[in-house]
Image (cartoon, helix red, strand yellow):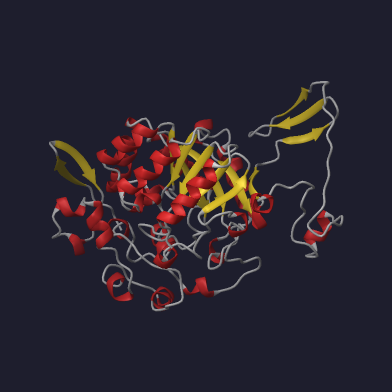
Amino acid sequence: MQNEQIISTENEKSFVQSYRHREWNDVPDEKWNDWKWQLSNRLNSFEEISEIINLTPTEANALNQNSLFRVDITPYFLSLVDKDDFNCPIRRQVLPTEKEMYDFSGMNEDSLSEDEYSPVNGIVHRYPDRVLMLITTQCASYCRYCTRSRLVGDSSKNYNSTDFDNQIEYISNNPQIRDVLLSGGDPLLLPIKRLESILIRLREIPHVEIIRLGTRTPVFNPNIITQEFCDMVEKYHPFWLNIHVNHPKEITPELQQACDKLSKAGIPLGNQTVLLKGINDTVEIQRKLCTELVKMRVRPYYLYQCDLVKGAGHFRTPISKGIEIMEGLRGHISGYAIPTFVIDAPYGGGKIPLAPNYVLSQSPNKVVLRNYEGFISVYTDSDDEPDQEITSGNRKGKDISIMDLIQGNEKFIMPQNFRNSKRED
């Protein structure tokens, strides 16, 4: 689909709009650019979506299943889909296929064991100084690889005022928590007054230094970034915001304008990308994505290996593909544009960074290094080497080896004194 560009006017300031599907040509600009209209007119059925794009049999069958993860697509985002190209990177992220019904090795509904690390409903306390605070199960649209598909999209599992009270109390009672990440679902789907009430309460906790928010809504519905939202958030600095862009095609004039508003409000912006097979798993696409993000003052933060979540097996790439991509980024684009490639480890292991092997050899006082061009040099290391004590074990209290993991005899190795917030209660 060839994207057109339409010039519109708002408050005497010109702005550029992306292509709008002819189905909505009669919708006035003031409605099309209204984020509430976009949410109210999301498409989710075979009948509605087939009017906009030509569905394949596997897409049609999946849309007619009642047991699959929820489908909702904003008119804005669906207009970015190539209606005839099954491999369109926008299309494959939001339209289900029959592959979501296939099991795969390692599959798990709660692939990160978040429930195990949840001392109160909606809090995930995996790291000593920070917590994940889930405040809604709703999103503007639903990604087919969603890590929390066991919760997200289900209004019956949404969080209420009692949950918020318990979450705030837990954070208040744990002075080691200095960093709170708001997520869900998507926090921007909360009414702005309710979101502000949460920010006010967090800012009243003396030991909470940083508040972060993760959102994909600006990609699905960029006009939700209003001046009212920016003015509200600006009162609660230091406040950081991560968006979630997976492909350069998602970077539209509307998203650029939304990010510009956020930057002007003094909000540092990062981006989290999920590595998805056949969508963004090439060096060329990732270079384009990362450099385009930096141009709109968004720092690439994480490149995630796709989680082992139920229904997402067909999106997974080999880990070697992610390392290959990182090899193709380092040295070829600015360091500001290079994310950290991570696996969010199963069984609650947390984020583990992966990178190409630039250390070729190491001795007590020499390190042999390789750069991105293959240039090899030796670095004279410090003579000071602190003693390290390494211990290991697991829940069963017996010694196990890496070979036990490879052979499938064990699922993880748990060090002695491994921190688990739930067990410490």
Where does the image place residue 60, in percent across and percent down from the top left? Answer: 38, 76
Image quadrant where residue 141 sits: bottom left
| Left or right, residue 80 beside residue 272 | left
Where 107 falls versus 15 (above or below)? Answer: below
Total marks shown come to 0
Instruction: Locate residue 387 relative to residue 221 in the image: left or right.
Output: right
Position of residue 376 measured from the top left corner of the image (x, y, whole percent): 73, 30
Viewer-nearest residue: 41 or 375: 41
In this rendered view, identify the residue nearer to me: 370 or 117: 117
Q: Tell me if residue 121 comes above or below residue 362 in the rendering.
A: below
Position of 332 with respect to 46 (left or right) is right
Res 20 visible: no
At 54% from the left and 40% from the top, the residue drawn is: 339
Quarter the N terminus occupies: bottom left
Report if residue 178 is visible in the image.
yes
Percent x, y for residue 130? Answer: 57, 41
